[in-house]
């Protein structure tokens, strides 16, 4: 029987700080995740699903369980917990990772799972007028600049916050998005309207970097093994986050005390506040700006393949959802009622 902290059903549990306190199994799982350079969010999610699986089966060790126990756990998520299909899939991938990459056990295809119902929901999209009203209520600070950039480029919030100085090309008016969803790079436009504010922000950012150099905290987290290939790269200006946190923090993986990128919650709160001030009666969050970006481009007559590339979708069918948001299904269908004069 494993000794674990009881997991929180709604959020990932707080994990002990020292390896001595942590169960060996989860230590191994965490190490396997880091070898593959998965994100910290994925690491936390996988660990909490492993804990919940173990607790579900009375703290039995996963090596003493198999397909039947995995199927029972995943089915309970759908029938007992009423989770979404995406949540159930996340749990399944976490457990398959545990068995394949940590225990060295390959589970056959899981046929006995009761699948969570897949919801086919259209995204919430703002009109041009609503977007304008929201942008006018933004604060004149870093949060406001980031939110404008989200709408002006169609970036995901994590992609925007992880932008580095070298990714911004003012001469060509373009932004290179590195390692977006699926590990893919792509290029999007740099809105002319934001050039003065971004240039001023980067000047101030450089001043802060000089302070960090003087205090010995100028190193930044680098992707993959770049820090081993180029030991001094972490201190270089080109690799610094454009939108850096206002203070230093401790990296939960390495223990390094340095400046991380701007926090997501700051943006989420600012969007919610601006939407409320603009009296927008829709569900509005940072990703709504990405949906609105795509829809407004299609409304302006841009072809769907271009929009697909700007969003970084692998399949155009993913982008096609915005034609449904436009309520024209790609065929320009007009209601018969609109053809009748009453």
Image (cartoon, rainbow, N blue to C red):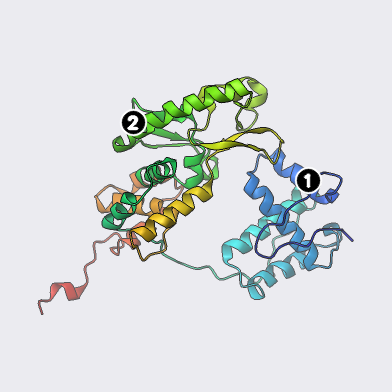
Q: Which label was assigned to residue 334?
A: none
Residue 318, image quadrant: bottom left
Residue 317 visible within the image: no
Q: Position of residue 104 (x, y in %)?
A: 80, 49
Q: Secondary structure at mark 2?
A: loop
Q: Quadrant of the C terminus?
A: bottom left
Q: Tell whether 11 sits left or right of 17.
A: left
Look at mark 2 in the image and give the residue it sits on.
173
Place of residue 321 in the rendered image (x, y in percent of width and height, measured from the top left): 39, 59
Pointer 1 local density, CA inside 10 Å: few below 14, some 14–19, many at least 20: few
Where does residue 174 sit, x and y in percent of width and height?
37, 32
For the point 41% across and 41% down, which residue is it?
A: 141
Q: Which mark is residue 17?
A: 1
Q: Is residue 301 left or right of residue 19?
A: left
Look at the numbered discs 2 and 1 and tell me whether their residues touch, using CB distance below 8 Å: no
Distance between the Cα atoms at labels 2 and 1? 44 Å
Tell me where residue 255 sits by quadrant. Answer: top right
Q: Identify the residue at image location x=52%, y=32%.
A: 241
Which is more foreground, mark 2 or mark 1?
Answer: 1
Image spot of residue 29 (x, y percent): 77, 48
Is residue 221 positioned above or below 330 on the image? above
Local packing at callout 2 (Cα closer than 10 Å; few below 14, some 14-19, many 20+) is: few
In this rendered view, identify the residue nearer to me: 338 or 214.
Answer: 214
Q: Earlier in the sequence, mark 2 or mark 1?
A: 1
Above or below residue 203? Residue 249 is below
Which residue is at a point 67% across and 38% down the rendered structure image? 251
Please identify the quadrant where the N terminus is shown: bottom right
Question: Which secondary structure, mark 1?
Answer: loop
């Amino acid at each position: 029987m494993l000794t674990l902290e009881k997991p929180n059903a709604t959020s990932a549990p707080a994990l002990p700080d020292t390896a001595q306190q942590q169960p060996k199994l989860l230590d191994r799982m965490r190490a396997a995740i880091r070898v593959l350079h998965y994100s910290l969010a994925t690491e936390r999610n996988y660990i909490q699903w492993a804990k919940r699986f173990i607790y579900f089966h009375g703290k039995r060790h996963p090596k003493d369980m198999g397909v039947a126990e995995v199927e029972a756990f995943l089915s309970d998520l759908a029938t007992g917990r009423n989770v979404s299909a995406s949540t159930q899939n996340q749990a399944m991938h976490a457990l398959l990772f545990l068995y394949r990459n940590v225990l060295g056990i390959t589970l056959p295809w899981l046929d006995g799972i009761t699948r969570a119902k897949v919801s086919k929901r259209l995204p919430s999209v703002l009109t041009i007028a609503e977007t304008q009203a929201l942008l006018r209520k933004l604060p004149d600070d870093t949060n406001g600049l980031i939110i404008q950039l989200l709408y002006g480029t169609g970036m995901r919030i994590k992609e925007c916050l992880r932008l580095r100085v070298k990714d911004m090309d003012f001469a060509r008016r373009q932004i290179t998005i590195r390692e977006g969803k699926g590990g893919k790079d792509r290029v999007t436009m740099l809105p002319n309207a934001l050039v003065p504010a971004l240039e001023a922000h980067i000047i101030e950012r450089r001043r802060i970097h000089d302070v960090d150099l003087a205090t010995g905290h100028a190193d930044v987290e680098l992707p993959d093994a770049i820090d081993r290939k180029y030991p001094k790269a972490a201190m270089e200006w080109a690799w610094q986050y454009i939108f850096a946190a206002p203070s230093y923090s401790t990296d939960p993986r390495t223990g390094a005390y340095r400046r991380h990128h701007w926090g997501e919650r700051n943006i989420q709160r600012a969007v919610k506040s601006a939407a409320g001030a603009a009296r927008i009666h829709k569900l509005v969050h940072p990703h709504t700006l990405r949906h609105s970006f795509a829809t407004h481009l299609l409304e302006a007559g841009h072809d769907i393949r271009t929009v697909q590339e700007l969003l970084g979708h692998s399949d155009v069918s993913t982008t096609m959802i915005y034609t449904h948001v436009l309520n024209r299904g790609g065929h320009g269908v007009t209601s018969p009622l609109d053809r009748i004069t009453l």
